[in-house]
Amino acid sequence: MEMDADVLTLCKAQCDILSLGCGISQCCSMSWRLLTGHQLCRLCLFRKPQPALKSKPSARVSYETDSQSNKENMRTVERLQACSVDIRKIRRLKAWVLLEDDTYVEEIANILKELGANKTVIASILERCPEAIVCSPAAVNAKRKLWQTVCKNEAHLIQLIEQFPEPFFTVKDQENQKLNVQFFQELGLKNVVISRFLTTASSIFHNPVENNKRMIGVLQDSYLSLGGSQANAKVWLLKLLSQNPFAVLSSPTAVDQILKCLQGQGFTNSQVLQLLSKLKGFLFQLQPESIQNSISFTKTTFECTDDELRQLVVNCPVLLYYPAPVLEERIQALLKEGISMAQLRESPMVLELTPQIVQYRIRKLNSLGYRIKDGHLASLNGTKKEFEANLSKMQAKQGRPLFNPVASLSVEE
């Protein structure tokens, strides 16, 4: 069944928040891209079947799709149409919603209207998240109250619902979600951060609160055991969580295995702590075997000693994070552009960038007469915003006159 373009756009926006993108230097982008994209279009898995109505049977209409006849609930269709919802979009996205006996179109629309949503916004929400109409009004109102505890006002709340309707209308585990919100507030996270978690990292609120508490303790203990100070432990932990809330979904066993793996490779506690901080908790999502393969590949490729290798990895954690085939592809792409291994050793952070981004940036620099293979690779590094700012400075510098026309001339008398 083909997804509607609006839904694909939303999925891409979510994934773009969590994919690795240009690399670890683009930390915010990377954090969300990595893990949330796969959840967006599968929320129907959380749907609880609604009990069938005891009253008179609903009027129904039949239509043909994919050579299969399905019976739609005509009342549901008519009520959605009254809300200016495009039924065709729902049929393409989640047609099962139209087959349900028990739906709450008017009730859900009224709740959204009470929050300040106009007819256009309501239609958009229902088109992108049709399962909203099978959620009971009581459950939605409970979710509304929970989200209001971390939102500045109702305008902020409806804005979040409009942007991320699926997490809001996932109404299972309400009590557990509430306990997790309270726990994160007590931990010291700001409401604005928690509201971001609710929309882009909602799975952590479905995790049992006791599991989240246990992992917070494990992360804090790991920080202290690696030489972190007690005075900075809470600040470090809150920063880690704000950058990567999915760290709480790791397991104590995984944390222990990764730390032992790195220490077995000769990394000092201080170096491991630097890696943990730079990788923002994503370190625990790696496998010991993958780490060993990446380290072996890096040592062979850069022809360095063990001490040089460890310092190289600490300076550029991407060498540890990405698997060997990805690193090899990026190195080969750079070599084809005329960049030498000596340059790569001096500026390994360029490996955070995909080959496509590297080629684009090299073309931009070439247009200004800058020969990257004869210079330093630092000009390629940075986020898109940082690169464009640096490019603008270089363009401005080229446009300056060779002398200052308003400066007084020094003439010998």
Image: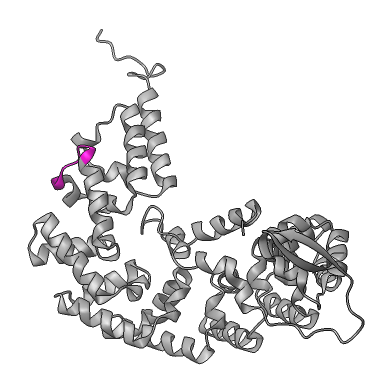
Q: Residue at x 34, y 27 (%)?
A: 367
Picture layout, residue 189 above or below residue 296? below
Instruction: Determine which quarter of the picture holds residue 34.
Output: bottom left
Q: Residue at x 34, y 33 (%)?
A: 363
Instruction: Determine which quarter of the picture holds residue 224.
Output: bottom left
Figure quadrant of the C terminus = top left
- Residue 239, horizontal then vertical, whole percent: 43, 72
Is residue 185 or residue 166 the one in the foreground? Answer: 166
Q: Residue at x 83, y 58 (%)?
A: 119
Q: Is residue 55 visible?
A: yes
In this view, the residue farthest toward the bottom is 210
- Residue 235, horizontal then vertical, whole percent: 42, 76
Reply yes or no: does residue 338 show up in magenta: yes
Picture layout, residue 192 above or below residue 20? below
Q: Which residues are magenta?
A: 336-342
In this view, the residue farthest toward the top is 413
Reply yes or no: does residue 273 show up in magenta: no
Instruction: Determine which quarter of the picture holds residue 390.
Output: top left
- Residue 99, horizontal then vertical, whole percent: 76, 71
Q: Is residue 153 visible?
A: no
Figure quadrant of the N terminus = bottom right
In this view, the residue farthest toward the right is 56
- Residue 72, horizontal then vertical, whole percent: 80, 67
Relative horizontal placement of residue 313, taking residue 299 as reference (left or right): right
Picture layout, residue 23 above or below residue 40? above
Relative horizontal placement of residue 241, taking residue 146 as reference (left or right): left
Is residue 393 or residue 59 the one in the foreground? Answer: 59
Q: Residue at x 27, y 50 (%)?
A: 330
Relative horizontal placement of residue 134, taking residue 293 as reference (left or right): right
- Count of marks, rendered view: 0
User: Colour mode?
Assistant: one colour
